[in-house]
Image (cartoon, rainbow, N blue to C red):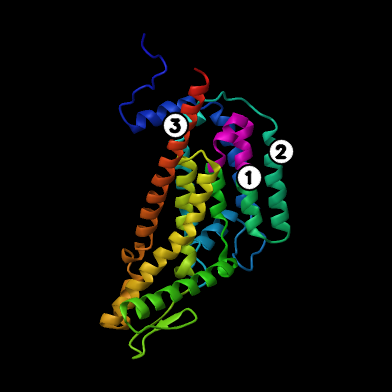
């Protein structure tokens, strides 16, 4: 007898998207509620006009993500919605495997989001309002599609936390990270390579004075740390079910970010040693070369992930074998 639960075959991605779109109930209700919710944050989203002359929280967020700063880099916020949509699509079978139903307790999450926004609006803290914005959207999905949808979509919605711009608040994290990276590079060149590099705080230079590079907060840690943390977290929750393995992947992002920044800073110093300040500046500012920190980090994520995945499969196989032995 043939298995009737086999997935339907699609001629292309567009056909598959249309199929799942048709299976989604109460779309009109959800998008009407979503539009009203978004309108609130557009017209009454920001109360501190001294920083950004706009009432729209979305415009305030755009300014925060795209402004040039030496102390912060929140540009990753531009890409989080796309990442969330991709992960929701990857988990489509899980999302659509449950029964959809209107679930009125979802309004409690919407009310919690509204309360957070009112508090953020009054005290002029847009970060609190951003938390309220996404809490409310999450609550609307639960209201329209039910608690099982909330459970299945929790992790993708959790990633919206990365859209809260941290600005200079990250300095307590980035400054020790910058010190660590410059210390490692100093000893790498002096002790292992025999190349004289002098460090003063987060400044690296040589004795001849042909180059000197200040490791700024934005490019010296937080950018790659948050990006690698996002990659590790996404990998952990998409691949593993074990909470321990998920935590190990998340915590691995910090040393991987350090390794990546050491690689990048080392290339800058090597260029400076060979051809002086301009060469190092070119390596530092080049968009392609600036991707270097992510190569060892992504490789590290894959290696650690494969190791943990094999261990998880082995543990699962051993548990199945033991259970089977008792039932003979």
Q: Is residue 19 left or right of residue 102?
A: left
- Any part of residue 97 in sight: yes
Q: Residues within 10 Å of mark 2 (few under 14, many from 20)?
A: some
**Which mark lies nearer to you, 3 or 1?**
3
Instruction: Identify which residue is drawn at 59% across, 69% down.
Output: 172
Rendered image: mark on residue 143? none
**Could you say where residue 150 lies in the image, as x and y percent from the top left?**
59, 35
Instruction: Identify which residue is drawn at 46% across, 51% down.
Output: 232
Can you tell which quarter of the image residue 36 is in?
top right
- Give the magenta range: 136-155
Callout 3–callout 1 Cβ contact below 8 Å: no
Q: Is residue 116 left or right of residue 231?
A: right
In the rendered view of the protein, which quadrant contains the N terminus? top left
Work out whether 151 lies above or below 235: above
Distance between the Cα atoms at labels 1 and 2?
A: 10 Å
Which residue lies under the disc numbered 1?
135
Element assignment for label 3: helix
Dot placed on the residue nearer the N-terminal end, 2 or 3: 2
Element assignment for label 1: helix
Q: Residues within 10 Å of mark 3 (few under 14, many from 20)?
A: few
Which residue lies under the disc numbered 3?
317
**Could you say where residue 57 lies in the image, as x and y percent from the top left?**
60, 55
Distance between the Cα atoms at labels 3 and 1?
A: 39 Å
Which residue lies under the disc numbered 2?
108
């Amino acid at each position: 007898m043939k298995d009737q639960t086999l997935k339907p075959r699609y001629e292309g991605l567009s056909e598959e998207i249309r199929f799942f779109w048709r299976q989604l109930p109460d779309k009109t209700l959800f998008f009407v509620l979503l539009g009203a919710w978004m309108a609130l944050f557009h017209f009454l989203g920001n109360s501190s006009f001294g920083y950004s002359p706009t009432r729209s929280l979305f415009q305030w967020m755009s300014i925060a993500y795209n402004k040039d700063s030496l102390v912060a880099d929140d540009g990753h916020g531009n890409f989080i919605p796309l990442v969330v949509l991709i992960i929701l699509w990857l988990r489509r079978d899980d999302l659509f495997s449950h029964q959809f139903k209107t679930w009125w307790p979802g309004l409690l999450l919407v009310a919690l989001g509204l309360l957070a926004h009112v508090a953020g609006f009054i005290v002029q803290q847009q970060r609190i309002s951003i938390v309220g914005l996404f809490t409310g959207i999450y609550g609307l999905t639960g209201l329209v599609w039910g608690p099982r949808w909330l459970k299945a979509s929790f992790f993708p919605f959790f990633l919206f936390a990365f859209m809260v711009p941290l600005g200079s608040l990250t300095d307590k994290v980035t400054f020790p990270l910058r010190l660590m990276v410059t210390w490692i590079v100093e000893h790498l060149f002096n002790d292992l390579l025999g190349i004289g590099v002098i460090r003063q705080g987060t400044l690296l230079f040589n004795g001849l004075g042909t180059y000197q590079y200040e490791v700024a907060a934005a490019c010296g840690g937080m950018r790659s740390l948050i990006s690698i943390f996002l990659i590790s977290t996404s990998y952990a929750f998409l691949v593993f079910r074990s909470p321990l393995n998920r935590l190990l992947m998340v915590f691995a992002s910090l040393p991987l970010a350090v390794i990546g920044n050491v690689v990048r800073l080392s290339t800058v110093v090597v260029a400076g040693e060979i051809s002086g300040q301009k060469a190092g500046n070119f390596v530092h500012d080049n968009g392609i070369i600036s991707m270097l920190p992510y190569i060892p980090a992504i490789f590290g994520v894959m290696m650690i992930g494969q190791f943990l995945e094999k261990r998880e499969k082995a543990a699962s196989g051993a548990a199945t074998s033991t259970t089977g032995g008792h039932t003979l």
